[in-house]
Image (cartoon, rainbow, N blue to C red):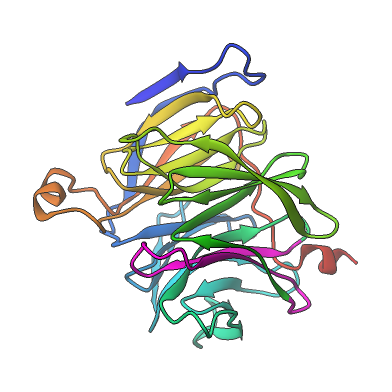
Amino acid sequence: MIQNGSSASPLAPLGAPTVLGQPECLWPAGATLGEGTLWSQREQALYWIDILGCRLYRHDPAGGAQQTWQFDEEITALAERADAPGLIVTMRRGFAFFDPAVDAPPRYLHQPEPDRPGNRFNDGKCDRQGRFWGGTMDFDCVAPTGALYCFDADGRCTRHDDGFAVTNGPTWSLDERTMYFNATVEGCVYAYDFDSAAGTVSNKRVWLRFAKGDGLPDGMTTDAAGRLWIARWGGHCVSCHDPVSAAELCRIELPASNVTDCAFGGNDLCTLYITTARSGLTDEELKAEPLAGALFSVRVASPGLPAAEFGAAAAKA
């Protein structure tokens, strides 16, 4: 069910987006932990991930073709490379290159946490300068051992924040002056002042705290109007928010409780792709949610933004 303008603040400078129709199941993959939605502008196809299933998926909406790659360990997030074919990905222990067109395993570039064997990487994406931001988390989602990292095209990896049990995001404001990052277990979306030129964050503050029983903040994206779209783990939905006030503008309900990530794609960037998960559900709940772990899509009247590529600034230089 779609609830347009369900709880928008009267002070919100942005209006509710128009959602066209109901979500459609594109791929009933039964992913244990669907995540990592990435629309490839060059291929006009969607990549997404089953983290705990150690799989990468590719969906071609034009022809309907679907491909799957199986790995020996978790793959958790990805972005296209600006200066070369293939992808930068986060695997269990760090950053790696992987080319889906080549029959070769991912090649690790950097593993920043040899002292934290109980951690793995989780969500991440690139900023407009081509730096990959990724977060780590406790495998058991309990210990506050996760951190926020930035990996540059020159191979430099910097830890910018620490002390998270589960990390998700990030995404940015349209003017690139704010970065949003999720502390999922805390039910909290943080905002940081973001220096795009330097690639640094500061002035961390709570931007949005989810109400108890209304899901937890998971993956998210920003649309071309600047609104934030946040997948709600345990909340059966993606919610859309004003970037300044955090007021909720609308909800898109899904037939799966654990909604994990979302990204805009399609040739007009007006299709919102949404991943879900089977992880954390009992046998009884799985029977009630046969589409848990599926990939969904829904049309929105306003577009999203193209995904930033790794090494974009260096490629332009």
Residue displayed at 31% across by 43% down: 234
Farthest right residue? 317
One can see residue 9 in this view? yes
Residue placed most toward the observer, 20 or 177: 177
**Quadrant housing residue 227:** top right
Q: Is 37 situated left or right of 25 in this image?
A: right
Q: Position of residue 267 (x, y in %)?
A: 59, 44
Q: Is 264 situated left or right of 177 in this image?
A: left
Q: Position of residue 250 (x, y in %)?
A: 46, 25
Residue displayed at 45% across by 19% down: 4
Magenta residues, start to end: 130-156
**Quadrant housing residue 245:** top right
Residue displayed at 58% across by 85% down: 108
Residue placed most toward the observer, 24 or 134: 134
- Tell me if residue 312 comes above or below residue 69 in the rendering: above
The image quadrant where one finds the C terminus is: bottom right
One can see residue 270 in this view? no
Q: Position of residue 145 (x, y in %)?
A: 48, 68
* Numbered marks: total: 0
Residue displayed at 66% across by 29% down: 244
Q: Is 297 situated left or right of 256 in this image?
A: right
Q: Position of residue 176 (x, y in %)?
A: 76, 45
Residue placed most toward the observer, 23 or 281: 281
Q: Is residue 135 magenta?
A: yes
